[in-house]
Image (cartoon, grey):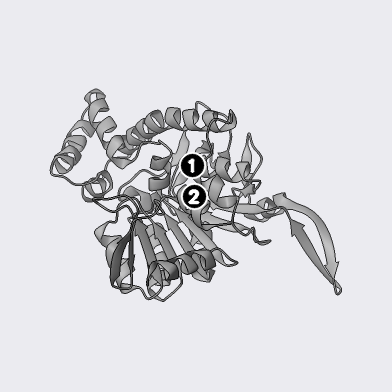
Amino acid sequence: MDFDALLKFVQEQFTDGLVLVIGSGLSEAEEIPGMKALATYLRNEAGVLKEPEKTLWDRIMTRLDAGEGLETALLKQPPSDALEVWIAQKTCELLMPEERKVMSAVLRGERTLRLTTFLDKVLKPPTGLPILTPNYDRLIEVACEMAGFHVDTTAVGQYAGAFDHARSCMGSCRGITSRTKITVLDHFPRAIVLKPHGSFDWYQFGNDARRCSLDLDAERLIITPGINKYRAGYNSPFDKHRELANDYIKKCTRLLVVGYGFNDDHLQTHLMKQIQDGTPTLILNRSMSPKVEKLAKESPRCVCLSKPPKSSGVAILTNGHQFEHLSHDLWDLGVLAKELLT
């Protein structure tokens, strides 16, 4: 594949059947702290821990000191329920003030999110655009609304919203049309945002989960990194989001993967199979992990764009071929949208 073929591949990618998978890399690009920053924050805050959580955390920290990432360390040394609650609280404590800064700047008109720039230029399918993410923050929701999309979170309501996928699908309906004796629902442009790891606006209300856009003094429903997330992922509403996400992955005809490291079995089992089976896939990552590099090399219709290690422009890897092009930073979603999409 030469650069002209890359341009053609990219421009043909954004049609019906597209599914977006967005990881923490895109949030980091918008100044939300990532896993490394979270690991450092937890390390600095761990002095308040009492036994037996202190001993458990010391074991986790030994793995961090050995160079393992936070998620890997938590997989190998699972936290207790109490330690997991502490990690979730500290995650919110670190990330939510930064989320607030970014969202405030967006709503004051001082910045435009990369995803908004992209969504302004892509086809808006009448069936909705699925966006799957393990991120807790709500930058995707804000970006979609700024681009004129109705956001379907599978919850109905803003302050004590119940999770009801069937009802939430109707939230974007703007009318009914008839086509040759067939009644068709007409929808506003819609993004279906699925979060199998939870969200900062998901709360535990007694035995139920609710979505509330306010900052409440209540238990937030997020699944922290580590082995416990696989157990928690089978509880509602995590299970429904995971199920819907995997259904969209299996049915898609094209994939755009942004800032995602393929470190989550909730999504990646179906996702990697779809890519390896030949679904046209564009991966945008600032840096290319060995796992992503292997996937791009071995999959027949997968293109990975990343930042060259020693120059500006873009590094391109596809089907065993790798080259660099001294052009714009096309691995950045906002730059790619501005330069290649019209």
Circle on res. 195: 2
Task: Specify the quadrant that holds the N terminus.
Answer: bottom left
188 to the left or right of 134: right
Please name the amino acid that badge 2 sits on.
Lys
- Where on the picture, by quarter, is residue 181? bottom right
Q: Which residue is located at x 40 percent, y 60 percent?
A: 283
User: Quick check: 334 above or below 95?
Assistant: below
Q: Which residue is located at x 16 percent, y 43 percent?
A: 63
User: Quick check: 195 above or below 317?
Assistant: above
Task: Specify the quadrant that holds the C terminus.
Answer: bottom right
Number of disc labels:
2
Instruction: State the image coordinates of residue 28 (x, y, percent, origin top left).
Output: 38, 41
Instruction: State the image coordinates of residue 247 (x, y, percent, origin top left).
Output: 52, 65
Q: Are the residues tagged 2 and 1 within 8 Å (C-beta)?
A: yes
Q: Mark 1 points at which residue?
A: 199
Tell me the distance, in whole angstroms, between the alpha carbons under discs 2 and 1: 7 Å
Farthest front residue in view = 326
Q: Badge 2: how crowded within 10 Å, few (<14), some, or many (20+)? A: many
The residue lying toward the viewer, choosing from 149 and 61, is 149
Instruction: State the image coordinates of residue 70 (x, y, percent, origin top left).
Output: 26, 43
Q: Is mark 2 on a helix, strand or loop?
A: loop
The residue lying toward the viewer, choosing from 322 and 221, is 322
Residue 85 seen from this side: yes
Please name the amino acid that badge 1 sits on.
Ser
Circle on res. 148: none
Q: Is mark 1 on a helix, strand or loop?
A: strand
Instruction: State the image coordinates of residue 276 (x, y, percent, origin top left).
Output: 37, 73
The residue lying toward the viewer, choosing from 319 and 235, is 319
